[in-house]
Image (cartoon, rainbow, N blue to C red):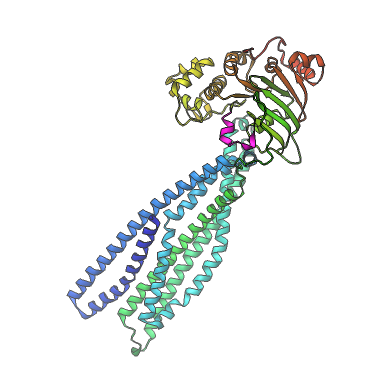
Amino acid sequence: RLLLLSLGALCIAAAANLLRPMMMGAVVARAGDKDALGLLRAGVLLAVVALAVEALRLSQSFAVQVAGARAMADVRTHIVRFFQRVELAYFDRTPIGRLVAYPTSDVEAVGDVFSSGVLDALADIVQLVGVVVMMVLLDYRLACAALAAVPVVALVVEVVRRRARTAFREIREHGANLSTFMNEQIGGIAVVQAFARERSMERAFDAINCAFRDASKRAVLYESLLDGGIELLCTLCLASILAWAGSAPTGRGVTFPVVVTFTEYIWLFFAPLGLLADRYMMLQAGLAGAERIVDLLGEAPVEKPAPALANASPRGPEDEVVAFDGVSFGYDAASPVLHDVEFVVKRGERIALVGATGAGKSTVASLALRLYELERGTIRVLGDDVRSYDREALRRCFAVVPQEVFLFGGTVLSNVAIGESLADRQRAEVAILRVGGGELLARPGGLDAVVDERGSNFSAGERQLLAFARALYRDAPVLLLDEATASMDSTTEARLEGALAAVMHGRTAIVIAHRLSTARAADRILVFHKGRIVEQGTDADLVAKGGVYARLRRAHFADAGDEPGTSSIPDVA
């Protein structure tokens, strides 16, 4: 509605503006006739028309910018919602800086189409057509002389258009590259400084920055050519009118008021053309940003909704919580990660997944959460095929404690009760106390204590306690520990034993274990080797077999210097 009102106001203003040259001609005629009263009336009328035109333009400008701000807010929201539905594999292969550029700089470029008055172009076109009609009606011979340069203008615009779009597209691409590079360098600044790579990084940045600068220079060049060319053509048209009027015989009826009126119409004709040139260049920048957004929405693969599986596996037994049946998967089709994996986790059972790095342990967790689409086989959670679940409902079946805890800027409460629109303060406080996080509540502000970006104002142990409290607050039927204490030293790990015990108590747990000391207290250990389960059983059974697990165990404790008799997960059964 705002856009329609804006365009209506513009068209009315453009039509009213066409009266001004005629009124100027009348003023000149009155002055020549020495008609003081008529001159006063014409001046007052001219002022009224000018004020009305400016009032219409002011209301139009306000309306269109409000509409633009709302539209861009909607586009940003749409992009962010779209990101929530994009498959995780897309984020694995796309730089963060490039993704951040879509809802920021690209949307800003599209928003500039509104704020820079590009939509005024419709009124400008109405004004251009009106000027041509008025000039022809006034004197078609002078009109032909004045408009002889229009084909040249059209040619200049077409030549510049092709090159400008390419330049602005390059600006958007190089801008995204700059954003990606800076995000990576700032994130890894400690490594850059530790390895004295500052000069190397400066050179790499300079290459990207120079490419961005050169694309910007080309865009400025085309904009300057368009502005200067139109200004030159306007001057030539004025000169041709004066030349025609000066050489015209008396019988042609070319009077001084007519020349003044034509001069005003020429300015009205070329002023929009000059603005059209600026707006056209801004439109090219906006279209370049819009192209990138449209490409994102069209190319990024979104998570598929839960289908009605005609060949869904039959529902599993009541005591089955998680089941993998003949599962094979690879992030890259040419390099499979899992091969025919089969296992069942019963209700209340604690399962540990162990194996060398890259054996496929974390992939099992990702597939259970349906972060990646299954290629072959079946996965059931609480008896139902994961592909039949709504994703949100499926993921609410799990409480996940990752190795690298990610805290969001906010408060302790918002990070513990993540995923809840209305946080329960009492429940969050109980969860923190149960994992032994009394020190977190002792901070100034307690549950409302500020958490900086990525939790940088908390120690590694405190961040892990928050992750355990988050899992306890979630109170999901399945607990998934993805190497939750792998990055901890022995002292911190021992300190977190109570938290771990509290989180696991009474729950079905799948523990992805890097440290074998973490796995020994599990009810059953699954040993992964090159994407296959090669052994399974208790710690004592697997040691007695003398197979892969026994070798891993000997190597682990020899390297770590731990005592095999200690356990990082207390038996809480």
Residue 410 appears in the picture as rendered: yes
Residue ranking furthest to the left? 37
Name the quarter where the C terminus is drawn: top right
Whether residue 16 appears in magenta in the rendering, the answer is no
Quadrant for residue 241, please give it: bottom left
| Magenta-colored stretch includes residue 388 | yes
Viewer-nearest residue: 337 or 62: 337
Coordinates of residue 400 in the picture (x, y in percent): 59, 26
Residue 557 in the image, given as x and y percentages of width and height: 74, 15
Quadrant where the N terminus lies? bottom left
From this viewpoint, which residue is outermost toward the right? 546
In the rendered image, residue 510, in percent from the top left (x then y), is placed at: 65, 23
- The magenta span reads 384-397
Task: Judge whether 198 appears above or below 522 on screen.
Answer: below
Q: Quadrant of residue 426?
A: top left
User: Which one is in front, 116 or 103?
Assistant: 103
Q: Quadrant of residue 551?
A: top right
Q: Which of these two is toward me, 363 or 392? A: 392
Q: Residue at x 43, y 59 (%)?
A: 119
Residue 381 screen position, x and y as percent? 64, 30
* Image: 484 above or below 142: above
The correct choice, above or below, for 400 with respect to 201 in the image is above
Q: Residue at x 75, y 36 (%)?
A: 336
